[in-house]
Amino acid sequence: MAASVLLACGLNEQKLPGFVHISEESNVDGSFLISCILGQRLRISNAGTLLVCLQNHYQHYFNAGMRLGYNSNIFLGKTFNVIDVLSDMARHGLSSKWLRSPDGLTLTDQLVKDIREQLEKNYPNRSSYTILIDNLSILINLGASKQQVQQFCLDLADLAKAHDNLTVITKLSNSDIHPLTDNNVAKLGNVRIQVLRLKSGVFREVDGKLLIERVLDDEGSYSCEQTRKEVLYKVNDRNVKIFNPGEIGVKV
């Protein structure tokens, strides 16, 4: 179930680290992590959540949530808010503010502005607040430079430092194609989760590997063995299964 994924990643507690980064390798899909985390945050009483949809529109996460056993629409507009960039661009085309800001802002600056507005409106009334960014790579696809993406993440990390019980969770797909950006963003945070392919290729019982790394020192080092954990995962229609590498004879 989704709970086993969150337990393996250390994200099953009510209080989460200030900044968490998910690195998604090419040809694997880590969006199930966003859905699992979203469901867990919505179930916490009086906890606020903001979902920024860049890769998938909101309906995708609603459908995924229903398969995982939660209805996000119940919380929508209450403890849960959405910035659906993808749907807005589909609806308004080239006139979308994400492609042509009326204030002359860059895409990433416009996003920071909207996130700050949501935070100012909703954070004071909540016991904790979580911001989920579903795919930073889409910002690059839409024309943002890698430097702008890194500055965007730095701004979010600063927000997390300035607010108690605020957590920012980002995901970057094709992390092996953007290694510098991926590593720089990961170093802003306390936890890094890598979604990786299996070295042995396609395997029926397993979709891929999660490598969970935690910062042990102030230098942002992920190299210490005590901070590393590997698990295998399989995404089914209604749940996510977690295995220890020794349980299945597959080269990880």
Image (cartoon, helix red, strand yellow):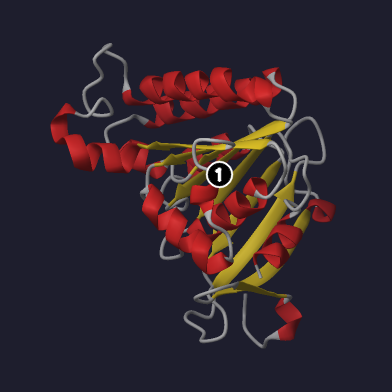
Is 100 left, or right, of 180 in this rendering?
left
Q: Nearer the viewer, residue 219 or 96?
A: 96
Q: Nearer the viewer, residue 54 or 142?
A: 54
Is 174 left, or right, of 126 in this rendering?
left
Instruction: Name the residue rendered at 67%, 88% in the picture.
Output: 249
Question: To which residue does mark 1 refer?
Answer: 75
Q: Amino acid at mark 1?
A: Phe
Q: Position of residue 166 (x, y in %)?
A: 68, 30
- Dot 1 crowding, Cα within 10 Å, few <14, some 14–19, many 20+: some
Quadrant including the N terminus:
bottom right
Q: Nearer the viewer, residue 236 or 175?
A: 236
Q: Position of residue 176 (x, y in %)?
A: 46, 53
The outermost residue toward the top is 103
Q: Quadrant of residue 231?
A: bottom right
Q: Quadrant of residue 4?
A: bottom right
Q: Nearer the viewer, residue 250 or 94?
A: 94
Do we see residue 30 in this rendering? no
Question: Does 236 appear above or below 92?
Answer: below
Q: Quadrant of residue 9?
A: bottom right
Instruction: Name the residue rendered at 58%, 24% in the picture.
Output: 122
Is 245 left, or right, of 208 in this rendering?
right
Is 99 left, or right, of 159 in this rendering?
left
Figure label count: 1
Instruction: Name the residue rendered at 80%, 51% in the picture.
Output: 227
| Callout 1 secondary element | loop
Question: Does 22 appear above or below 27?
Answer: above
Instruction: Name the residue rendered at 51%, 68% in the picture.
Output: 67
Question: Does 114 appear above or below 180?
Answer: above
Q: Position of residue 44 (x, y in %)?
A: 71, 45
